[in-house]
Structure formats: structure tokens, C-alpha cells
Image (spheres, rainbow, N blue to C red):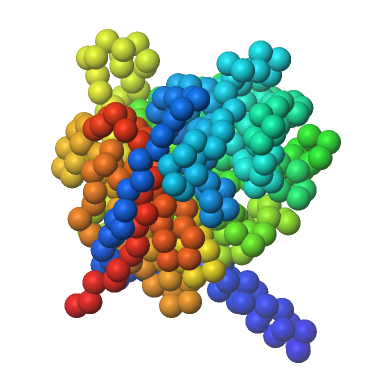
Amino acid sequence: MIQRCIWILALFSFLACNKPIENNAIPDLFELIVVDSTLIIEKDFFLNGQMEVKLVGDSLIAVSSFKSMAIAFYGMDGTEYGYIAAKDFPEAPFSPSSFDISEFPSLYILEHRRGSILKFDVQSKSYVETIKLNLPEGKAPKMAMSKFMVIPEGYLVELHSNLYSASDPKYYKNSGDLIYLFDKDLNVLNSFLNYPREFENTKGSILPNNYLVSSEFEQTILLSFAHDKELKRFDMKSPGKILEIIGLPKSRYFNYSINEADRIVTMEDRMSGQVTVPRNHYFISIFEDEELIIIQTWMNKDGDKRSREFYSNLFIYNKKMKSWGETRNPREYFSIGNLAGMVKDTLYFYEGNLVNQDEKYIKRAVLRQIQD
């Protein structure tokens, strides 16, 4: 009898730990205050556009570009630190789906065309080696923005299905597991995480995008699809094991619903300009430290699913208080840029889209809670 009671208590404890934290209240409001903007000076290499943006410690910002086929590094004072460009390495050409700089100056680049990881040394600007993954049949890294991490056990890589077009609803229904853990011998150890039902239930095309965001902190991995309104924390030592689920907040600005076309839209339809797939709000990135989880959003103009006016704000989760906030007055995306990360109470943004101006900037900002 005692053993049975202990088992029941253990079951309830497990369910409680894996139950989403409800966040039905409207989040607190914060002001995002830009402290300064530092002009970036490029002397040896011009990076065209931006894809992923990451902090290297507290002294450098790393930026990848699909157009330039390169990763560039800048000091916080705007100086050019260095770069790794595919054009300089004919023996190791790459198209960067993603990159990892956790072992800087080593740079690991996920290459989608060959399903490989290329290792470079940034300081000596040298190619080190190519690591060929043993990919499952029908799977490959995405062309851009696959989730990718170098971890003690090996490599964590997001793989998508190459059997379907991303405009086909079957892409989301039949993709299976998305996150794969490769060991040091480059074989699959484990896989987990499917597209949530919000994607699987679509009947028409949705605009292909980077709908999954990730962050690493203290041997855990946060993963989120905005549209199922959850953050899931996984154990890095045992990928697939959920440690925590945090419910995402209501928002004054962000729309969690998925907009889909009224039919399947082919690439030929889109190229003809006769059919437009509606846009969705989504998360650009997620960052975590000891106190906060911060998410940057991407939104098009409210009420216009086809608008090309894009905005961004931040969600802020206080881990101790288990409470959410969001920044008011979303900023025009091409003026604020991408959040690269945070150091103590300072947020660092990189604005290098070259849409509103010809210059690139590193911007420092802080958050101030707005009192009622």
C-alpha cells in the first residue's frame, strides 16, 4: 500500500513538472531604450546582408550571410575583427545553414548541400577539417537557419524532410523528428521534436520560414515554436527529455495564429505573382541567462497579412518571479536589427540589413519596466 502511494505521488510530481506554466495575464510593459549606436567599419571584407547573429563572449559579434557565403566578426567598437568566406577556401566551399562559435576561435559551419560540418580557425583564418554527418534517409540540414550546436556528446542538428516542398502541408505532417544528436563518430544517437499540431493541421500553404528557435544554457536546450505557445526545456545530456514547459504569454502585438493560403501554392504560382501566401508572425531568436529569457519577435503590419512593413518587439521572462513582460511600441525591424545577445543588463543588436541605410551598426540597449 505504501509503495503504491509513493508511486502515485511520484507520478503526480512528474506530471506537475511537465505541465506548462499558465500565463493568461497580459504581460508587464517594458521600454526598450537604445543607449548608443556604433558604426561598423569594414576595411578588408564587405558582408552583404545578415542571417544569424551571435555574441562571442562579451567582446565580439559574429554575423553570417547567405548572400556572401561568409561569417564576419566585429568588435564592440565597430572594428572588423576577421571573417571566414567560402571564396577563400576552394578546398572547403560552403553555404552556411548555421554556425557555432562556442569553442572560439574555432568556428563550426553547418553546410546544407553536403550535409557536413566544416571547422575553421578564425584567428589564423585557416581551414581545419570537414566532418561528414551520417544523415538519415530523406533528411538534410535546411538551406538556412537550421538549429546547430556543438555539445560535449557531439553535434545537435536540425534536419528537415527533403521529400516535400515546404509549401506542401505534408512537409509539416510527415517530417517526423526535427532535432538529431550525432555522436563523435557522426552517427545518430537520438532524435526528437516534431512540428506541433498547429502546423500539422494546416490544409493550405504557409509561408516557409524559420519557425523554430533555440537557446543553450547550463546543459539544457530551450526550443520553441511560437505558434504552440510553449517554451520547452530539454536535458542536453539526455536530448528528448523535457525538463520544463513554460507557457508563452498573451501579447498586445504578437499574433500566435497561423495564416495559411486557401490552397497549396506551388513555386510556379509564387513566381508568376498571381498568388501570395499570407505572412505569419514568428520568433527570430531566444536568449537566456541566470535571470531572464528574452525572445525577439518578427511581425508584419497588424491587420495586413501581405504587408511588407515589418516590426519587432521583445518578450521578457523573469525566471525567479515566473512572470512575463513585453516591450511596448514595436520598432521597425530594419531600424533595430537582430538581437545578438545580452551581457548583464545590456542588450546588443546588430543592424546590417542595408535596407533603410548603407551603414551597419552595433546598438546597445537596456530594458526599463513601465510602472502603472
Q: In which quarter of the image is the C terminus?
A: bottom left
Q: In this view, does 159 lie above or below 243?
A: above
Q: In this view, does 20 lie above or below 3?
A: above
Q: Is residue 26 visible?
A: no
The part of the image, by quadrant, that contains residue 24 is bottom left
Residue at the image position 67 percent from the left and 41 percent from the top: 105
How many numbered marks, from 0 up?
A: 0
Q: For this rendering, which residue is in front, 131 or 336?
A: 336
Residue 303 locus on image (x, y percent): 16, 42
Residue at the image position 22 percent from the left and 14 percent from the top: 274
Residue at the image position 36 percent from the left and 68 percent from the top: 324
* Image-based side of 285 in relation to 96, left or right: left
Q: Which residue lies furthest to the left in this view?
A: 303
* Image-based side of 20 in relation to 7, left or right: left
Q: Residue furthest right?
A: 185
The part of the image, by quadrant, that contains residue 146 is top right
Residue 59 locus on image (x, y percent): 53, 51
The part of the image, by quadrant, that contains residue 1 is bottom right
Residue 221 locus on image (x, y percent): 60, 55
Residue at the image position 19 percent from the left and 33 percent from the top: 307
Q: For this rendering, which residue is in front, 173 or 128?
A: 128
Q: Can residue 319 be seen in this view?
A: yes
Residue 270 locus on image (x, y percent): 31, 16
